[in-house]
Amino acid sequence: MTRLTLDHLNVGYGGADIVKDISLSVGSGEIVAIIGPNGAGKSTLLKGLAGVARVTSGGLEVDGTDLVPLSPFERAIQGVAFMPQDRNVFRTLTVTENLETSAWGHDDIRARMDEVIALLPTLSGYLNKAAGGLSGGQRQMAALGMTLMSRPTILLVDEPTAGLSPNLVGEMLDVLANLTRHAGIGVLIVEQNARAALTRADRAVVLVDGRLRRVGPAAELAGEPDFGALFFGDHA
Ligand code: ADP
Ligand code: MG
Ligand code: MG
């Protein structure tokens, strides 16, 4: 069991803090959704956890290991992987070759690739295709596969369904939810399709103006009569 713990965390880019006083945790086998209006600081929060924006105060630990002084690479070694919204694939390379580019830290790259393909079985349908020739959904699945190559225990995902056609949104979210159920990974996901995310998440937080406005079971938040008022970009 692994748990990522945020304790009164503040994050910024060098000026005033963007994200303030966030206390939250995500553990093995659960999926926690971060929703909130555009500009709320959702991406900044994930970047702070991943080490690509600055934690200015507060605690950030994984199972008692302080992540704050660690680089993004060192955090990944601790099991915390980040899939940014602009995570890209090399379009001239095949899916297999793309997975290989992320194959650090393993004695047996082939074995880890097989594990990732088992976690994302749809990949096996286009492993030898150049990524440039894939559909948007397939490319995003390849990007997720690359992220999983580091064998994360905690996965931070920023808007994995951005740009996907509506019928693929649920499919991608189901794949992420399955990672928690079948691989025991803890997933912290930022998602614009709030209702679609809440139907898959265990818990959810609503971030507004850099602060947590609400925290609760996803089903409870989804059932709020004033849900739309809590959250602007609700397309789901
Ligand atoms: P969200 O993901 O919720 O849409 P962001 O975290 O992207 O919100 O942005 C929150 C705020 O942080 C915005 O006001 C944005 O202008 C600011 N911001 C984002 N990236 C940077 C950066 N690299 N440097 C300074 N400010 C930034
Ligand atoms: Mg945004
Ligand atoms: Mg964002």
Image (spheres, rainbow, N blue to C red):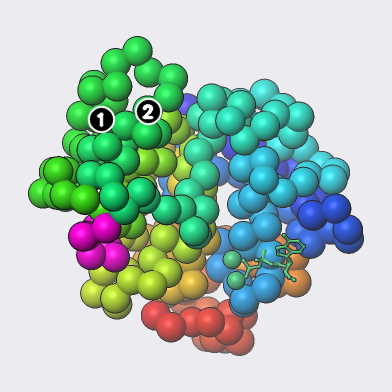
Q: Quadrant of residue 58 in the image?
A: top right
Label at residue 189: none
Q: Quadrant of residue 120 in the image?
A: top left
Q: CA distance from mark 2 to mark 1?
A: 8 Å
Viewer-side residue, 142 vs 31: 142
In the rendered image, residue 78, in percent from the top left (x then y), is placed at: 56, 25
In the rendered image, residue 59, in percent from the top left (x then y), is placed at: 77, 38
Callout 1 amino acid: Met
Label at residue 113: 1
Q: Work out whether mark 2 precedes mark 1 in sequence or the reverse, and give the earlier one.
A: 2
Residue extending furthest toward the right: 16
Tell me the SS state at disc 2: loop
Q: Crowdedness of circle 1 by 10 Å Cα count: few (<14), some, many (20+)?
A: many
Prevailing secondary structure class for the magenta stretch in the rendered image: helix
Residue range (magenta): 132-138
Q: Ligand 3 lies in which image quarter?
A: bottom right
Q: Is residue 125 visible?
A: yes
Residues at badges 2 and 1 in contact (C-beta under 8 Å)?
A: yes
Residue extending furthest toward the top: 107
Residue drawn at the location 67% of the way across and 41% of the way down: 51
Residue drawn at the location 54% of the way across and 31% of the way down: 76
Q: Quadrant of residue 174 in the image?
A: bottom left
Q: Is 135 covered by the magenta stretch?
A: yes
Label at residue 103: 2
In the rendered image, residue 159, in percent from the top left (x then y), is placed at: 47, 63
Callout 2 amino acid: Ala
Q: Crowdedness of circle 2 by 10 Å Cα count: few (<14), some, many (20+)?
A: many
| Total residue callouts | 2
